[in-house]
Image (spheres, grey):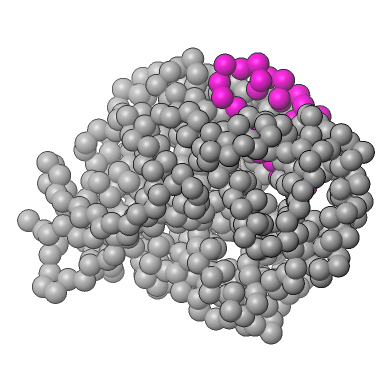
Amino acid sequence: MALASLFARSRRTASSSFIRSSRQLLHSTPNKNGDVSSISAQKGRRRIPNWWSRSLVPLAIAAASAASFAVLNQSISQSSALDSKGVKVGGKGSTELVVKGEYKEVPKELVAELKTILQDNLTTDYEERYFHGKPQNSFHKSVNIPDVVVFPRSEEEVSKILKSCNQYKVPIVPYGGATSIEGHTLAPKGGVCIDMSLMKRVKALHVEDMDVVVEPGIGWQELNEQLEQYGLFFPLDPGPGATIGGMCATRCSGSLAVRYGTMRDNVISLKVVLPNGDVVKTASRARKSSAGYDLTRLIIGSEGTLGVITEVTLRLQKIPQHSVVAVCNFPTVKDAADVAIATMMSGIQVSRVELLDEVLIRALNMANGKNLKEVPTLMFEFIGTEAYAREQTQIVQEIASKHNGSDFVFAEEAEAKKELWKIRKEALWACYAMAPGHEAMSTDVCVPLSHLGELISRSKKELDASPLLCAVVAHAGDGNFHTCIMFDPNNEEQRKEADRLNNLMVHSALSMDGTCTGEHGVGTGKMKYLEKEHGIEALQTMKKIKKALDPNDIMNPAKLIPPHVCY
């Protein structure tokens, strides 16, 4: 029997007063079915570090979600009686959260080829496959899990893996930091999960050009730690633990997008391995180009459905000379949203404008033992020279006073600013702490800025009337807002109510020429809204692109493009 081996799991959580981080090694052992962590044992085999950063709240979440994921059979992958309901998943009219898929056993010949390519950087251990088959921050589930998890170390290995899987027509699911929340890393058809966590090098830093070339497995926080000594930083700040490759795949953004743009604005070029194993470089390092199709933007946001990203060239920014963080309270979310809009209309180039409703402030108070005033709150960040940042602060204070703003406070000292932003970063964990044993359905609608106040006001009426705990947090400077809808995954009525609220906000946003997802991506959870947002012709065009690059449909199948779309 082969020896159990150790594989890399990387979990990063937001630091907070109620989250206690710890690290430990997790040794996998053969399960009752005889699954083992690698195909064969060899003398002097190298083991891969298996560090898993843990915390109190995420552990509680994992324990709660484990029960709801018990539909998985202990065998590698099976379609179960879940398919007998006859409901659609992902397409128009979808009502089910469990993603189905036709399962075909992975050929032994392919496993042997992968073993030759990767040596010990491969596992069929059930626990490892189960871990990779269940998103860590999402309520979405799949009937099946990956059959094999592979850990490539180079672009060449990725190319060989894809070429072999394409030959056998076996599905591939790219896997980064596992922080996505729309089921992007589910394996509804089984197959091979390609974990990019070992490809995390900074390949080249061009300080004078203000760009950096990295592998996809590096996290944005880790990258910024390395860039700090050069006075540079990468300005996108999604959830803790997100990797650059995954950020490209979902076209993410974060709180700084109002100043620096989204991922599509901050990636200069990519290298991507296509399903047939070809390696494509999408652009040069030039800051602008009119040469040919924009392949970089085609891959960004493709969610692993067109290929696997192996290299990313990123645009960097100078660390601001000075910054001021300000907080202001309002009687209603409409007043807060109006101030955010007025601030943007004034021409002030804020770097952050975040809105937190009274429910979220209450959750933060309970989680952290704070005594914040439980009313809608706006948080700002102003950057530039010391004089310029202070001038912006004073102007916004005047704007806020004209819209019923009160208790306007600001901080310039590093520790004070850190403490204020800590409030925003802990939003999701505070909701989990306020509703133990519940899952979070996180909405992600985005509308033209002038419609933000109307959309939030309309949504808040429904949210406040719902029996579920619903907390609002918004990137108010660019019209994007989230609602954390907490529901018991074992309570069908609560699940339906959460889905109703989500549908209400999405359709309201679409009626305002908005989008169902501003930064989280489509995955499996948002597919059902795409036809209304884009129209069938646009979806058919996407399908043609997918078919041209991935004729065997092996790249992250059952994601992004609704299953009912054909051409």
Q: Position of residue 373 (x, y in %)?
A: 69, 34
Query: Is 390 on the left or on the right of 315, as rendered?
Result: right
Magenta residues span 452-478
Is residue 344 shown above or below 392? above
Is residue 329 shown above or below 500? below
Query: Is 548 on the left or on the right of 116, as rendered?
Result: right
In terms of depth relative to the viewer, which is nearer, 550 or 422?
422
Residue 473 within the magenta-colored segment of the rendering = yes
In terms of depth relative to the viewer, which is nearer, 549 or 476?
476
Give the total of numbered labels.
0
Q: Is residue 455 visible?
A: no
Is residue 208 shown above or below 96? below
Q: Quadrant of the C terminus?
A: top right
What residue is shown at x 65% (from left), y 57% (from top)?
416
Q: Position of residue 165 (x, y in %)?
A: 35, 57
Please identify the residue farthest to the left as the structure is shown: 1
Query: Is 46 on the left or on the right of 442, as rendered?
Result: left
Dividing the picture into quarters, in which one does residue 334 lie? top right
What residue is shown at x 62% (from left), y 23% (from top)?
501
Dividing the picture into quarters, in which one does residue 393 lie? bottom right
What residue is shown at x 24% (from left), y 54% (from top)?
26
Q: Is residue 403 visible?
A: yes
What residue is shown at x 71% (from left), y 25% (from top)?
459
In terms of depth relative to the viewer, which is nearer, 365 or 251?
365
Residue 488 within the magenta-colored segment of the rendering = no
Q: Position of residue 10 (x, y in %)?
A: 39, 57
Q: Quadrant of the N terminus?
A: bottom left
Q: Position of residue 15 (x, y in %)?
A: 49, 53
In terms of depth relative to the viewer, which is nearer, 493 or 83?
493
